[in-house]
Amino acid sequence: MIVVTGATGNVGRPLTQALTEAGEQVTAVSRHAVAVPEGVRHVTADLADPAGLTPALEGAKALFLLLSGDLHAPEARPTDLIDLAAASGVRRVVLLSSLGVATRPLGPTRVAMRAMEDALRESGLDWAVLRPGGFASNALAWAESVRTQGTVAAPFGDVGVPVIDPADIAEVAAACLLDDRHTGGVYELTGPEVITPRQQAAAIATALGSPVRFHELTRDEAKAAMTRHVPAELADDTLDIIGAPNPAELRISPDVEQVLGRAPHPFGDWVARNISVFR
């Protein structure tokens, strides 16, 4: 049995589906009760409280660990999750980390994630680490303004990074969970091309078949919007990257193709699959 945390998110949902289709028994973990595919067990847990994951880990052989905001919750001890997994008999953990661990290792949020990676390496478990860059699905934040105003608002309109389709992350995660060849692997996951917010807006317009206007936000405006949903330090870290990406953050990684035997999907493919949310 494989446990998938963050199972209702942009990575966890397709990962749960992929594992189910591969014939695996899956336990989906999320904060709230949700519908899951037929045959999937669901457990409600908040990873900010590691002990809450105990029921989900019963009988598990592998764990996909996605921490998201739980990593930064007050009093959080996320490395306890790795100890708990080992104590529960889990043999393999695949950790969703961040490209920033390598490209900006001194950022506060990167230091915390590096500690998770280090704890996993020292755990004695089989492991793999996934380090994605920016997600194509971050464009979902524009869905309402596209639907109601035909507008995309974002900072740094002409500064791009190679955003990754979450479905590609999920497929790589499934491979790492199921195939021993990926044990000890650290994979940097990017899309196949650098794309700017203005170009993303144009891709949405093309898929819709109607105009989408791009409005450039100031950094302060963007931070004010982001801090409604994430801690201020995480907002600053993100804005530093998307505003002035360094060469390592602009690099097109070969790792998706190395694992999957195909190139990663471009942003336009993600838009085409998700265009209904923008209509």
Image (cartoon, grey):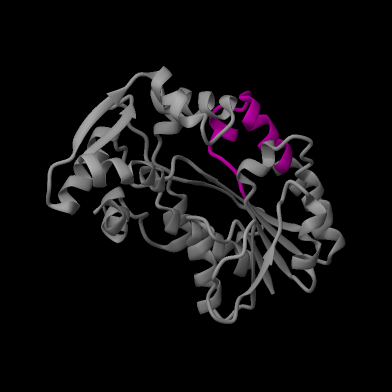
The spot of residue 168 in percent (x, y) is 43, 57
Q: Check residue 115 for magenta coloring.
A: yes
At horizontal 64% and vertical 78% (from top left) the residue drawn is: 25
At horizontal 65% and vertical 26% (from top left) the residue drawn is: 108
In the orientation shown, which residue stands out farthest toward the left? 210
In the orientation shown, which residue stands out farthest toward the front? 148
Q: Where does the magenta region start and end? A: 96-116
Side of 25 where 249 appears, left or right: left
Is 99 above or below relative to 269?
Answer: above
Residue 202 in view: yes
Q: Main secondary structure of the magenta part?
A: helix
Q: Check residue 7 for magenta coloring.
A: no
Closest to the observer, 92 or 72: 72
Residue 246 in view: no
At horizontal 69% and vertical 34% (from top left) the residue drawn is: 112
The spot of residue 113 in percent (x, y) is 66, 38
Side of 245 where 84 appears, left or right: right
Closest to the observer, 6 or 82: 6
Closest to the observer, 253 or 80: 80
User: What is the quadrant of the N terminus in the image?
Assistant: bottom right
Is 13 above or below relative to 163?
Answer: below
